[in-house]
Image: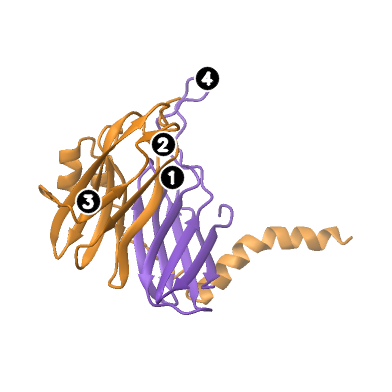
Amino acid sequence: MNNQRRNVLKAGSGAALMAVLAAAGIITPGMALADWNKAAFDAKSMADTLKALGAGTPVDSKDVQVTGPDIAENGAVVPVGVASSLPNVSMVAILIEKNPNALAASFVLPEGTEANVQTRVKMGQTSNIYALVKSDGKFFMATKEIKVTLGGCGG
Amino acid sequence: MGNPMKIRAANKDGVTEVKVLVSHEMETGQRKDSAGAIVPAWFITELTAKHNDKLVLSSEFGPSVSKNPYLAFKFKGGVKGDKIVVSWKDNKGDTRSDEAVIG
């Protein structure tokens, strides 16, 4: 067993892989994927979050569906999904009203990507979750209450 | 660098569904350890997905996305063998990129 070779591989693999990826143009230097919207993620209340997202007062819409369990036994892993049949959806966001920071995730959907995303979020307590959708420049939303029996944000 | 992501991409009737399972702690910064000290926040802030070289999803996460985040989305187009690249960046500046082919 050639131990030296193993070690060299181990030490080199991280940096080398980055270089290869950079060369292949997968990671371009300074790839600031997008500017993380700190204001929106730091906002505590629903109203502040909507303001930071530039959403104003979204209209409730039947064409936005928010899916999730009625009761989540484990608040640390709550599957939620947002789907919409509205045209030209360019942005989708998931907000949890009673979490310390309401915004959980936001998605920018380029043309061709469907308004249908699923993920998993943490919930500190029973709360309404809001699906925010931007369609043709206007904001729409839908609400669902998820009851949490064991919080996922405490210690 | 983190651990590799699990990425599945499948095309059905002209629509490609991508499922991603990322390996990340997603520490909220609200939790305390046994000594009572706050565990610093450590979470993915941005995640993007590309189909060949075209951006198909750009997302921003907060700390309330679950540990080892799961994400599923769909886009029109894509054929078997096309490349899907998913990249993330966390609040400590760490990044990772993984790829998969549409099956």
Q: Which residue is mark 2?
A: B28
User: In the rendered structure, are the residues bearing label 3 and label 2 in contact, judged by CB atoms less than 8 Å apart?
Assistant: no
Real-space Cα distance between discs 2 and 1? 7 Å
Q: Chain of mark 1?
A: B
Q: Nearer the viewer, residue B87 or A25?
A: B87
Q: Secondary structure at mark 3?
A: strand
Real-space Cα distance between discs 4 and 1? 22 Å
The answer to whether A13 appears left or right of A20 in the picture is right
Q: Which residue is mark 3?
A: A132
Real-space Cα distance between discs 3 and 4? 39 Å
Q: Chain of mark 4?
A: B
Chain letter of the orange region: A
Quadrant the C terminus of chain A occupies:
top left
x and y, in percent, of residue A87 in the image: 19, 67
x and y, in percent, of residue A36 in the image: 31, 53
Q: Quadrant of residue A15?
A: bottom right
Q: Which residue is mark 4?
A: B35
x and y, in percent, of residue A24 in the image: 52, 77
Quadrant the N terminus of chain A occupies:
bottom right
Can you say whether B29 is above or below B52 in the image? above
* Residue type for callout 2: Thr
Q: Which is more foreground, mark 4 or mark 1?
A: 1
Real-space Cα distance between discs 2 and 4? 17 Å
Rendered image: mark on residue B43: 1
Q: Which is more foreground, mark 3 or mark 2?
A: 3
User: In the rendered structure, are the residues bearing label 2 and label 1 in contact, judged by CB atoms less than 8 Å apart?
Assistant: yes
Q: Secondary structure at mark 1?
A: loop
Real-space Cα distance between discs 3 and 2? 22 Å
Q: Nearer the viewer, residue B62 or A1?
A: B62
Chain letter of the purple region: B
Q: Earlier in the sequence, mark 4 or mark 1?
A: 4
